[in-house]
Image (spheres, rainbow, N blue to C red):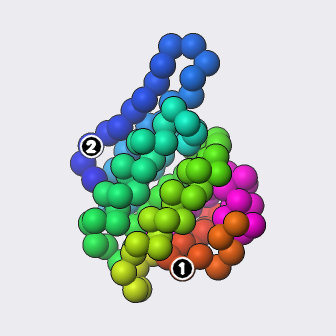
């Protein structure tokens, strides 16, 4: 991924910035995944599905919130990965881990790493 996506509005609306990872296939995201940023998040996931790498890293240590629809978009994208491919979700917000465990337990294609 070579582009930087950012949505930020004046006032209280949250934003989401996404940057390519150095030395790994994947992105680092910062901000929130919610109603106003969902299109950015879904675009990142779609691009990851199309890229075809066996492992695609999502560094989320600077993401403060992912709503249920954002978690669902991640689960849906993981479901579209061919066998053997996976997303490695690094340091996600606690709410995302809980939502995945509750609604998509054992989802094929998602590995959550807290380190």
The residue where tag 1 is placed is 108
Q: Is residue 11 above or below residue 65?
A: above
| For residue 59, side relative to residue 53 (left or right) | right
* Disc 1 from disc 2: Cα separation: 28 Å
The quarter of the rendered structure image containing the C terminus is: bottom right
Q: Residue at x 64, y 79 (%)?
A: 106
**Dot 2, crowdedness within 10 Å: few (<14), some or many (≥20)?**
few
Tell me how many marks there are: 2
Q: Is residue 100 above or below residue 61?
A: below
Q: Nearer the viewer, residue 62 or 47?
A: 47
Q: Nearer the viewer, residue 35 or 16?
A: 35
- Find residue 111 and report its horizontal and vertical position in percent: 56, 73
Q: For the magenta stretch, what is the residue range? A: 87-102
> Could one spot residue 21 in this view of the protein?
no
Q: Residue at x 57, y 39 (%)?
A: 34
Choose mark 1 or mark 2, whichever is in front: 1
**Dot 1, crowdedness within 10 Å: few (<14), some or many (≥20)?**
some
Where residue 63 sits, quadrant-wise, is: top right
The residue where tag 2 is placed is 3
């Amino acid at each position: 991924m070579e582009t930087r996506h950012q949505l930020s509005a004046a006032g209280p609306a949250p934003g989401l910035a996404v940057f390519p990872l150095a030395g790994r296939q994947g992105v680092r995201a910062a901000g929130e995944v919610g109603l106003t940023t969902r299109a950015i998040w879904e675009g990142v996931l779609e691009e990851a599905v199309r890229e075809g790498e066996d492992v695609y890293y999502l560094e989320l240590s600077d993401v403060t919130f992912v709503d249920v629809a954002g978690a669902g978009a991640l689960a849906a994208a993981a479901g579209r990965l061919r066998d053997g491919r996976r997303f490695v979700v690094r340091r996600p917000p606690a709410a995302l881990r809980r939502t995945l465990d509750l609604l998509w337990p054992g989802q094929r294609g998602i590995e959550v790493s807290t380190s």
